[in-house]
Image (spheres, grey):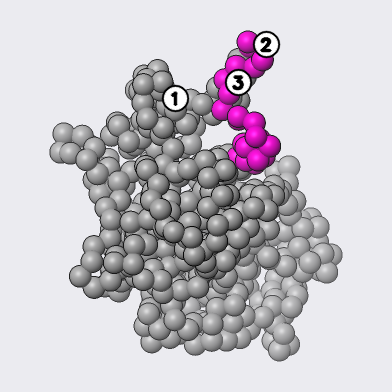
């Protein structure tokens, strides 16, 4: 057939678009089915103001575009990277993040890999969609919602196509689910007589709220040094530089902490952002002005689907990408980077096995296990620990207590204390520790490499040994102070905290 396609991508998310681009670059004929019917606005700013993307709730939240993503774009789609830079995205190099630690004698050649992109999610999506629309072999269908899958029986069964809500049927050797964390693929597969992939899920332990600001003309944003966020145990915060002088701030807390739920209200959000030492200079009215409402997101889970079970694909002819495959706590900002890695892994496997059969599924599964799963498991395990820490803080306990009442060492308490009193301050003292952390955070090295690095571990222990003679490393107040501040209401005097 003249209109035969090699792949159908269900969902016009960042993951879906990147997968379609990666496949089209390898010569695949790809159709993208996008449920939203809204046309592409004329500019990123117009998109930020009014692009109706109901299927992409993340558009109104903070995003980090990590070094692994920047490097993939530079290698595979340099024209897209150029477009992002032309529309205001900026590179953030290791020397920028290291601040006073990143002097000439402290940098090494591998630091050239540590380049992040400061960019709004909506700008990234706008540039990506415009780039994708111009690619030969890539067809875009707006307002097309999938209702069911077509499949052939077999062992394993094979997905052969999709049926849209207008009755149109599209067939292709490869069907890609890029519909996000609320994917309905399990329902579609069951209706087609196929047992869906196993789904692993665990709570992230947070709700979060984000707000965007624009730096005033003539003003300068505060200088970023070191990590752009922190965890106070009961409260997490992040500062996310963007394009066109726009940045965002995200505040997150436990959904089980009712006294902090007011963070989703603009008055409470602004009051706390203006009070915290790390964010107050950013939201100073002389420096910036809000350009969005406060957007909140809750009921968050770490999720992973298993398309291969005991060495056998659940179904041939189908792949999952982005949040439909792996979804982690969004506070770490890895979603778009995961999606990009996932997209090019799909393209690699398809190029080797264009029939999207068993060999394709097994190669892709092994690549995901190697390139994505270690960071997924890292975040999942961190969230489990964070949930316990937050609960103990709410009950008035000290989760960082090293010794039990009987004098024995509490291993969890010791590790938490070591991280808080050794690792966190070492990030601000030692360029080598900061480099190793940022390489892992940016998915350039395995999470398992952190404390296995002898120099890093030695430095952390040395800094930990000075904990009694050093000021508090936490850049923020304790929970009781935050609860009291929120209880005062948004109109309370904005006294500045020391920090």
> The C terminus appears in which quarter of the rendering?
top left
Q: Is residue 465 shown in magenta?
A: no
Q: Dot 1: within a 10 Å radius of its alpha carbon, few (fewer than 14), some, or many (20 or more) residues?
A: few
Q: Nearer the viewer, residue 26 or 424?
A: 424
Could you say whether the residue bearing mark 3 is in a helix, strand or loop? Answer: helix
Classify mark 2: helix, strand or loop: loop
How many marks can you see?
3
Q: Which residues are magenta?
A: 384-408
Give x and y (percent) for residue 463. Answer: 37, 23
Question: With respect to residue 188, does 475 lie above or below?
Answer: above
The image shows residue 313, relative to residue 187, as above or below, that is above
Using the rendered view, name the quadrant where residue 63 is placed. Answer: bottom left
Say which residue label 2 marks.
406
Residue at mark 3: 411
Q: Nearer the viewer, residue 427 or 397?
A: 397
Q: Residue at x 70, y 71 (%)?
A: 160
Where the N terminus falls, by quadrant? bottom right
* Residue lying furthest left: 104
């Amino acid at each position: 057939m003249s209109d035969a396609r090699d792949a159908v991508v269900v969902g016009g998310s960042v993951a879906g678009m990147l997968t379609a681009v990666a496949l089209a670059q390898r010569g695949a004929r790809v159709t993208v089915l996008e449920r939203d019917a809204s046309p592409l606005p004329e500019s990123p700013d117009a998109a930020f103001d009014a692009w109706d993307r109901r299927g992409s709730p993340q558009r109104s939240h903070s995003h980090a575009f990590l070094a692994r993503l920047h490097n993939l774009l530079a290698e595979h789609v340099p024209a897209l990277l150029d477009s992002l830079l032309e529309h205001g995205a900026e590179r953030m190099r290791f020397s920028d993040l290291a601040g006073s630690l990143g002097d000439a004698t402290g940098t090494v050649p591998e630091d050239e890999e540590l380049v992040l992109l400061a960019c709004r999610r909506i700008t990234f999506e706008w540039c990506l969609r415009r780039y994708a629309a111009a690619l030969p072999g890539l067809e875009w269908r707006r307002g097309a919602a999938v209702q069911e899958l077509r499949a052939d029986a077999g062992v394993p069964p094979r997905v052969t196509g999709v049926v849209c809500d207008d009755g149109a049927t599209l067939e292709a050797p490869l069907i890609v689910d890029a519909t996000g964390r609320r994917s309905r693929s399990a329902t579609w597969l069951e209706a087609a007589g196929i047992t869906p992939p196993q789904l692993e899920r665990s709570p992230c332990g947070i709700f979060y709220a984000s707000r965007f600001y624009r730096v005033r003309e003539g003003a300068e944003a505060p200088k970023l040094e070191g990590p752009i966020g922190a965890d106070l145990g009961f409260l997490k915060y992040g500062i996310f530089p963007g394009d066109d002088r726009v940045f965002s701030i995200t505040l997150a807390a436990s959904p089980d902490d009712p006294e902090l739920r007011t963070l989703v209200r603009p008055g409470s959000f602004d009051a706390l952002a203006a009070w915290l030492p790390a964010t107050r200079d950013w939201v100073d009215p002389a420096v910036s002005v809000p350009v969005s409402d406060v957007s909140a997101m809750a009921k968050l889970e770490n999720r992973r689907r298993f398309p291969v079970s005991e060495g056998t694909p659940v179904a041939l002819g189908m792949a999952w990408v982005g949040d439909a495959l792996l979804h982690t706590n969004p506070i770490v900002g890895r979603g778009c980077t995961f999606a990009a890695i996932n997209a090019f892994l799909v393209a690699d496997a398809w190029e080797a096995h264009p029939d999207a059969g068993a060999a394709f599924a097994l190669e892709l599964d092994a690549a995901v296990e190697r390139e994505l799963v270690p960071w997924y498991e890292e975040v999942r395990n961190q969230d489990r620990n964070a949930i316990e820490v937050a609960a103990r803080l709410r009950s008035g306990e000290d989760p960082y207590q090293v010794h039990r009442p009987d004098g024995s060492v509490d291993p969890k308490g010791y590790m938490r204390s070591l991280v808080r009193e050794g690792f966190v301050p070492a990030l601000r003292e030692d360029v080598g520790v900061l480099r190793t952390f940022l390489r892992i955070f940016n998915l350039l090295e395995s999470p398992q490499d952190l404390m296995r690095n002898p120099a890093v571990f030695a430095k952390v222990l040395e800094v930990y040994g000075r904990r009694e003679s050093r000021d508090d490393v936490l850049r923020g107040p304790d929970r009781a102070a935050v609860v009291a501040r929120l209880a005062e209401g948004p109109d309370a005097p904005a006294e500045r905290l020391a920090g």
